[in-house]
Amino acid sequence: MTYRFYYSIIAACLLIAWRRGGLDVLVNEAKSYDSVFKEEQALKKYKEILTIEPDNIVALCGASINSVRIGNREKNEEKKKALFADGLTFAQKAIGINSQYDEANFCMAAALGRKAELLGAKERLSMAKEIKKYADKCVQLNSNHAGGHHIIGRWHHRFSNLSFFEKAAANTLFGGIPQEVSESKGLYHLKKAVDLKPDFILYFYDYAVALNDADNENEAITILKKALTLKQQTSDDPSIIAKCKELLDDIQ
């Protein structure tokens, strides 16, 4: 009886070690796809991990951000909504497991931001504070999280450049534009994202847009020209480069 007990313990340990080793391989494969922005392949791997270990927070975050990125390119509105909904569900599960994980907070902010883009102006504004709450938490936990800084920077820029209708909606919802909104803070965080990830074209473009809107045309031109020298990495980069060229032509 004793020997059987020990044999069962050894067998269980070996099974756990085998399972752990297999998961590590899958995680490494998913991360390798992430590193070269192959979102579809990465998402497939992360989902495969989650069928084995549903509370794997790395896989939940990976599945979330890749769902959001793929959804952002999707032309079919129903598929786009479904991917954004998946991204938010994965992020919510990750936050539920560890709310002190910087990437989980980033994924929540990103997923909420994309969901908000599908809504009307009032609905978008009503979600704004929640989006920023998670982005702020992300950079509080990790001051070098480029994605977190990018979302905060865009948040400040967006609120600093509301349309007449959006300002009216903000007056209704918040009694005015949130007091913390600052164009200079937006520029700071967007620049921080660029400094932390100097090979990511999207960050350069959004920083240039904010600079131009703040009447810093010369600096915007410098940033746009730098963006045009960067190696294209993601499936979105060709369209972002086209936007960079268009903005550069408008400014010059």
Image (spheres, helix red, strand yellow):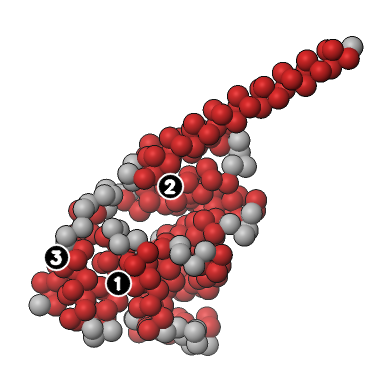
Name which of mark 2 and mark 1 comes first in the sequence. 2
Q: Which mark is residue 245?
A: 3
Estimate the x, y position of residue 164 in percent, counting from the top left.
Answer: 35, 84
Q: Which residue corresponds to mark 1?
A: 207
Q: Is residue 130 visible?
A: no
Query: Disc 1 residue type?
Result: Tyr
Residue beneath the point at 62% across and 60% down: 100
Q: Which residue corresponds to mark 2?
A: 67
* Secondary-structure class at tag 1: helix
Image quadrant holding the C terminus, namely bottom left
Query: Decide: marks 2, 1 in contact (CB < 8 A)?
Result: no
Name which of mark 2 and mark 3 comes first in the sequence. 2
Estimate the x, y position of residue 233 in percent, counting from the top left.
Answer: 26, 49
Q: Nearer the viewer, mark 2 or mark 1?
A: 1
Residue beneath the point at 61% across and 55% down: 95
* Secondary-structure class at tag 2: helix
Estimate the x, y position of residue 70 in percent, counting from the top left.
Answer: 36, 47
Residue 52 left/right relative to 210: right
Query: Disc 2 residue type?
Result: Ser
